Image: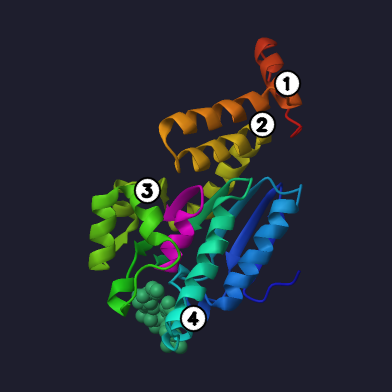
Amino acid sequence: MEYSKLSVKKENGTAIVKINNPQSLNALDSTILGELDALFTELENDCSVSAVILTGEGKAFVAGADITEMSGMNASQGKAFGEKGARVFRKIELLSKPVIAAVNGYALGGGCELAMCCDIRIASEKAKFGQPEVGLGITPGFSGTQRLPRLVGIGKAKELIYTADVIDAGEAYRIGLVNKVVEPQELMNTAIALAEKIAKKAPIAVKNSKEAINRGMQCGMDEAINIEASLFGLCFATEDQKEGMKAFMEKREAKFNNR
Ligand code: COA
């Protein structure tokens, strides 16, 4: 499929997805949300892709949901827009492959929410994060009220959301919102190296680990332990488990085949 506001480059098993509408700082409008929806279905089904990196063109990662588009909405249109964004972000979160956000600049509102639905966030020193929605008379609408407290704790999430404060990359790292901060020119190389490092591991084991974490974080400990046990058990039905353990015992590097 052709995308008008996204660019996609696939290299060595990693798909680099760039949100590409820099004149409005990559603000998320219905078109971009629809394109992300279609693209992540495509990436799920593309066996040549083992990891995804999400980044933005220009000085922003994403400067939020499109305020111009939202300005004329009534309550039911607002709800539908929020539901659409939340559904697309959940699809990204549940992709069966790792998704890394390479946050190049502003990640505000929907941009911060987009980064948070990724598995791992690498930030440029130029990145800025925040949920400025209450300053516009709305709540965060693409699941920020849910993912921010899960990542940084309830107290800090409430402070950030109620004040609409924008924080720099260093502070985002300090509170656990991002995994790593790097110089701007190192951002993509760092994200690609991370994707390639993960790609060397057993893909089904990575996928099952992601599923165990995602599902387990949503339920009580006993149920979560059972979820892990099932996914752990399923790994033993794979060729990669045989190869991984055989390679260890033979003191050589494992060669995984995603089977
Ligand atoms: N929705 C729609 N358009 C947006 C946008 C958004 N979320 N964020 C930026 N833009 C547009 C601006 O309107 C401007 O368009 P114009 O050139 O037609 O006037 C263009 O992107 C560049 O933005 P500008 O504000 O001139 O850049 P800046 O460097 O001075 O400021 C920001 C950058 C990110 C601080 C500022 O754009 C901003 O505060 N954006 C809104 C952030 C926000 O509240 N997001 C949450 C939305 S729910």
Q: Which residues are magenta?
A: 109-124
Q: From the top left corner, tell me how far across and down residue 136 is, in percent.
A: 32, 79
Q: Hey, what amino acid is under mark 4? A: Gln
Q: Earlier in the sequence, mark 1 or mark 2?
A: 2
The alpha-carbon separation of the residues under discs 3 and 2 comes to 26 Å
Instruction: Find residue 107 and report its image quarter.
Output: bottom left
For the residue labelled by badge 2, is the local secondary structure a helix, a strand or a loop?
loop
Q: Nearer the viewer, mark 4 or mark 3?
A: 4
Q: Residues within 10 Å of mark 1 (few under 14, many from 20)?
A: some
The residue identified by callout 4 is 77
The residue identified by callout 2 is 202
> Tag count in the figure?
4
Looking at the rendering, the quadrant in which ligand 1 lies is bottom left
Q: Hey, what amino acid is under mark 3? A: Leu
The alpha-carbon separation of the residues under discs 4 and 3 comes to 29 Å
Query: Is 243 rendered above or below residue 117?
Result: above
Q: Earlier in the sequence, mark 4 or mark 3?
A: 4
The residue identified by callout 1 is 243
Q: From the top left corner, tell me how far across and down residue 38 is, in percent.
A: 68, 65
Q: Hey, what amino acid is under mark 2? A: Ala
Q: Nearer the viewer, mark 1 or mark 4?
A: 4
For residue 67, the mark is none
